[in-house]
Amino acid sequence: MSDQSLRMILDNLHDTASLTATSERSSAGVENTQRNERNRVWRSVDTATQVVEGTLSVGAYVDCLAIIDHNLTAAGSLRIELLSGETVVHDSGPLATAEIIPVGAWRVGIDPYGATYNDKLAVTITVIETPLVAITRYRLTLEDAGNPDGGMQIARIALGMAFQPTFNMSWGAQSDWVDKATHEDSAGQTLRTINGGRPRRQVQFSLDWLQPGDRARLVEELAQRGMMADVFVDLYPHLAGLDRLAACFVGRLASGYGDTHTHPRNRKSTLTITEV
């Protein structure tokens, strides 16, 4: 298995965890991070240190965490502690929540000082990879005392054991920004655009060398949950900047799962995932 292979969280353990948070605003509780409505978020009452803790009903293995659509700045930090009972089995220490545009790519007079690649996208995302460990609890510590919004905010959290195929997706992966807007001429022949909004990302890729174990996991965790289940996808975990972030999001299958038996002990499957 290559470290360059795509990664997907097919079974988001966070969605079924029991959650607590240091603080939360009215109608912006931490349970909102388990929901996919775009207007549902967790928001702290101030910029003091915040701790979000989750307890699983059944122990599980994890190696990947993503916080999605958050407002943490380049000065903020995130620490993840993974616990088995009362024992901390992994402590990441404070980690940056944004990827600062480096010298050479940063444009003087155009990009603000301290600008990040995360700022370039409508949905800010931070992904943290951890060792594969068995846990019953997890704890996220957020620091961002200078946040100009007066509080910290996260719309979605994904946590689980990432699916990473033995053989990566084939060349030809397609990434689109799907926009439902349509153009219409007014009576005065002015071009009007209706039904517009924030475009949604969509990726289509083929797993042409799907090994039996990989296929079994897709059937167990994806096919049986269908198009209603949220999936975290990270097509290019080995890259940086917009090359990675543009194809890194929470989405759903655009159609049911299927595969083709191409060779002995081999299947192939084409997946299309649309951002929620």
Image: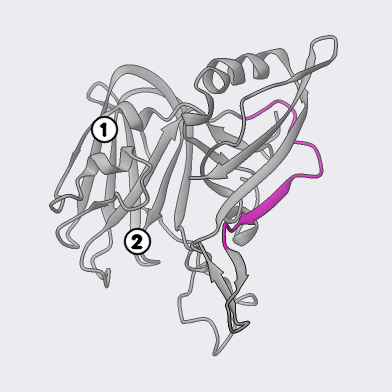
Return the residue found at the far front: 187
Reading the image, the residue beneath label 1 is: 54
* Magenta region, main secondary structure: loop
* Mark 1 surroundings within 10 Å by alpha-carbon count, few (fewer than 14), some (14 through 19), many (20 or more): many
Mark carried by residue 213:
none
* Earlier residue among tags 1 and 2: 1
Check if residue 165 falls in the magenta segment. yes
Tell me where residue 51 appears, x and y as whole percent: 21, 46
The residue lying toward the viewer, choosing from 79 and 73, is 73
Tell me where residue 29 appears, x and y as whole percent: 19, 45
Marks 1/2: CA–CA distance? 20 Å
Amino acid type of the residue that numbered disc 2 sits on in the rendered structure = Leu
- Residue found 19% across the figure and 55% down from its top: 44
Tell me where residue 194 appears, x and y as whole percent: 52, 66
Answer above or below: position of 272 versus 126: above
Residue interval drawn in magenta? 164-181
Answer above or below: position of 39 versus 134: below
Instruction: Judge whether residue 89 can be spotted in this image.
Output: no
Reading the image, the residue beneath label 2 is: 72
Q: Secondary structure at mark 2?
A: loop
Quadrant placement of the N terminus: top right
Amino acid type of the residue that numbered disc 1 sits on in the rendered structure = Gly
The residue lying toward the viewer, choosing from 48 and 183, is 183
- Residue found 33% across the figure and 47% down from its top: 79
Answer above or below: position of 10 versus 214: below
Return the residue found at the far top: 264
Relative to 228, 245 lies left or right: right
The residue lying toward the viewer, choosing from 26 and 77, is 26
